[in-house]
Image: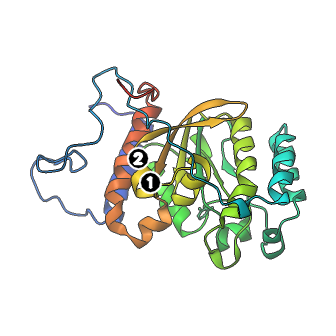
Amino acid sequence: MDLDAAETAALIAALELQIAWGADEALDEAPLDRTRPRPAAPAPQSVPARPGTPPAMVPAAPRAPVPAAAFTSATLRAGELAAGADSLEALREALAALDHPLRETAGNLVLSDGVADSGLVLVGEAPGADEDRQGKPFVGVSGRLLDRMLASIGVERARNAYLTNILPWRPPGNRTPTDAEMNVFTPFVLRHLALVRPRHLVLLGGTAAKALLRRNEGITRLRGRWHSLEVPGLGAVPTLATLHPAYLLRQPAAKREAWTDLRLLRRALDGAPPPGPPEA
Ligand code: URA
């Protein structure tokens, strides 16, 4: 088998990831793909796609009701500011100009890292302490795990990916963003997406999935499938929800699901037909 340097590097990274995840021993002569459904497993929800058939996309579901209290004048003001940003610089200025309590407690605005026109955007939750210090998303321990996960499928933030978060400022004590905070910053995220025009979008964790997909289910139900996110000014973007790397650090057993999702992403990046409407 002839492999070029990039393919070799991706294979080595995939091997290193497996070792880092604890698979440091070969138990059998032949590899066993544990990501495939086993005979005793309950029937999968969707029919496996025939060759050349687009993977089924999750049907549009009713939007999760947003608590009325979460709509404030800050939400309206944020929507106006976001809509007026016609470049990434303008978006950064608009965010910096937004008078919001999180700005008072955070050190730095954390907007993005990576290659804006790479076609692949990953959205996390909010900056942590390391990100707040450096002004860049995913530079702490979960960011390092994310980098290793992406490397295992030949993706690298410096080359072919772009990272951002739902919140651009660190919530005090790394608490989970509130509904009101998500509502204020989601218009900025949507505008951000319209400006960088991803062909594939990955939502890392429950906060990003809830804020953008606006679905009632938790991340464990939303992950592992392609959704369609309607981005104003851009159109429908194929969107994969997956587990947050910080969750994987706490729950190493869930790395199996994350690996399944990474492979789904790789297949789509390799040109598997974009997710279409569910088959009749
Ligand atoms: N977790 C996130 O969701 N985003 C970051 O930037 C870092 C950690």
In the foreground, 181 or 137 = 181
How far separated are the C-alphas under marks 2 and 1?
Answer: 8 Å
Residue 13 visible in rendering: yes
Q: Earlier in the sequence, mark 2 or mark 1?
A: 1
Q: In which quadrant will I find the C terminus?
A: top left
In the foreground, 124 or 99 = 99
Q: Is residue 41 left or right of residue 167?
A: left
Q: Is residue 29 left or right of residue 246?
A: left
Residue sitting at x 86%, y 46%: 80
Residue sitting at x 56%, y 54%: 210
Of all residues, the one furthest to the front in this rendering is 68
Report the residue marked by disc 1.
Answer: 149
**For residue 227, above or below residue 187:** above
Q: Nearer the viewer, mark 2 or mark 1?
A: 2
Of all residues, the one furthest to the top in this rendering is 52
Label at residue 262: 2
Q: Position of residue 47 (x, y in %)?
A: 27, 33
Q: Position of residue 266 (x, y in %)?
A: 42, 38
Task: Assess whether mark 1 and mark 2 are in contact (beta carbons under 8 angstroms).
Answer: yes
Q: Residues within 10 Å of mark 1 (few under 14, many from 20)?
A: many
Residue 167 visible in rendering: no
**For residue 260, above or below residue 144:** above
Amino acid at dot 2: Leu
